[in-house]
Structures are given as C-alpha cells and as structure tokens.
Amino acid sequence: MESHELEALEAVTTRPVHPYRTLTVDRLTPVLGAEISGVDLSEELGAEQLEEIHTAFRDHHVIVFRDQKITAEDHKRFAATFGELRLTNPPPPEGDPHVLEIRTSPAASYVAGDGWHADGTADAEPSLGSMLYITEIPEPGCGGDTLFANMHLAYEMLSPAMRSLLDPLTAVHDGALALAGYTPPEDYVIPKSEHPLIARHPETDRKLLYVNSVYTSRIPQLSEQESRAVLDMLFAMVARRPLLHCRVRWAPNTLVFWDNRCVQHHASYDYYPYTRYGQRVAVNGGPVKG
Ligand code: SIN
C-alpha cells in the first residue's frame, strides 16, 4: 500500500470510539458499519437512546438492527427521526407512497440496486438515507447480501495530486442511465443533476467522493475521453477495494439504515432461483454541499 493510503486508513481506524449508555454498538469493519443491539424499534424510543442511535449513524454511516418485529408505521416513525420522509419516484401503483417494496421473484433476470450507487443522486436534492427492512431472505446460506463502501475513505485514499485534480470538478448524474431496460410510467420525468464531484458531508463537513457507476455520466470540465477514463478509474476503485467496504448478511427482520450522502451500496444478486422481500423507506436530503 502507498504511504498516503496507509495514512488515510490509519486516521479512520484509530478515531476515538464513543461511549454508549443505552445500547451496544459493534463495528462491522474498522472503517464502516455497526450492528446496534438493545433497541426495540416497535416502540417509540426515548430521547437519550435516539440521540445515541443518531451518533452511531454519524460515526459508522451504516447501522444494522437485528430481530426487529415492526409494522410499516414503526418503520416510518423511526425513519422520520432523521428527517422528512421521501416519496418514492415513480410512485407505487398502489399502497403507501413512502414505502418502496424490494422484491425478487424466483428466477428474476434483474434486481433493484445490483450495481454500486447511492440512492437518488440524479435528483437535485438526493436522498439523505435509506432504511431497508428485510423480512424474507433466500434459503439460509444462499446469498442476497448487501455491500457498502465508504466514500470518505475512497476520497482520502486518493493521492494528493488526484485529490487536487478532482476537488474543483463537478459531475452529471443522469437517471436515464439507471433505467437499465425498465420502462417508467409515461408521466415520469427522468431526473438529471450536476453535483460537486468532491462533496462535503453536511453534518461533519468531511470531504467525500461523490460519483457512482449507476448514475454518473460525465465530468463536464473534461473531454469525453478524459471524463470516461477518470470515472472508470473511480468506479473501479470503489468496486475493487474491499478495504473500503462492509457487508450486511441479512436474516429475516433485519433493518439497515445507510447514509446515501457518504456511502454507496450494491445489492448482490447471487441467489437465483430464490426470492427475497423487504420494504424501504427513505429520508429527504438537501442540495449536495461542495
Ligand atoms: C437498494 O436500495 O439499492 C436495494 C438494496 C438491497 O436490496 O439490498
């Protein structure tokens, strides 16, 4: 590993750990994700416990709760403690417009989220975070994990020269790229937005890499060929560096909340011909901060 990469890893892995009073927090990897126990999401949470959960979310970016028996109302109540609930777009043909069903039927040819991305980055104001509650998993031991990657660390592990090149640039995020054969309703307006390529987390001001292979189409300040080469290099780094990642292995009744502002995720479709089912509620974010 190069010295600047080691330095970045060292800084992340030696950061101070918060003490918690009302819950237990166990890290998934030294750089990303934590499993939280001692919380019952079917109940309204007390102020102190809620504050500790929000602290764990800020510190670990992906938080996992096991063995939760919750209703859609419990799910939405917990999500709403992080901000305004996001409407699904396009809206579902029926049912609650805040709840997106994540369903894999037997022998599906494609599943939602099977590529490295953050949710909603083609929107002018992308999602703050997504909260997925999985109730049915493929046969035990048959896959369906979700991978996550830390975009703060992805930025910090770049060489100083590459960081200086990328710092002032923007990138176009185009919803058309993500349709991948899916035909949206006729009145669906395909979102497209330009965001800083290197963004800052709105709560911590820490810098992060803000491009993803599902939505990002172009760096407008570079030539077509340069833009393609830089984006492909960045996408490959996110996909091929397990040091940036953590993995959630689902069990029925697991709820995971991830920060779309600084984490990318990838649903692994490695469980043909089995099924998987869950419901996702998301929280609105604001404009991407440069
Ligand atoms: C998604 O929100 O991209 C789906 C994630 C998953 O199904 O694991």
Image (spheres, rainbow, N blue to C red):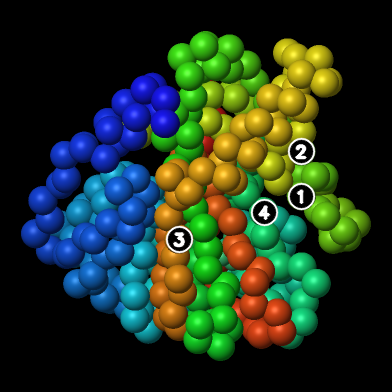
- The amino acid pointed to by label 3 is Arg
Residue 86 in sight here? no
- The amino acid pointed to by label 4 is Gly
State the residue in front, 25 or 147. Answer: 147
Residue 12 position (above or below residue 156): below
Q: Nearer the viewer, mark 1 or mark 4?
A: 4
Q: Mark 1 or mark 3, which is nearer the start of the sequence?
A: 1
Q: Nearer the viewer, mark 3 or mark 1?
A: 3
Q: Which mark is residue 247?
A: 3
Q: Residue 270: where, in percent of width, then height?
A: 65, 72
**Residue drawn at (32%, 26%), measured in percent from left and top?**
7
Q: Residue 151: where, in percent of width, then height?
A: 48, 37
Left or right: 199 as drawn, with respect to 177: left
Q: Mark 4 or mark 2, which is nearer the start of the sequence?
A: 4
Q: Which mark is residue 174?
A: 2
Q: Secondary structure at mark 4?
A: loop
Q: Mark 3 or mark 4, which is nearer the start of the sequence?
A: 4
Circle 1 residues within 10 Å: few <14, some 14–19, many ≥20: some
| Residue 68 location, quadrant | bottom left
Q: Which residue is mark 4?
A: 115
Marks counted in the figure total 4
Q: Which residue is mark 1?
A: 178
Q: Mark 2 or mark 3, which is nearer the start of the sequence?
A: 2
- The amino acid pointed to by label 2 is Asp
- Distance between mark 2 and mark 1 Cα atoms: 8 Å
Q: Quadrant of the N terminus?
A: top left
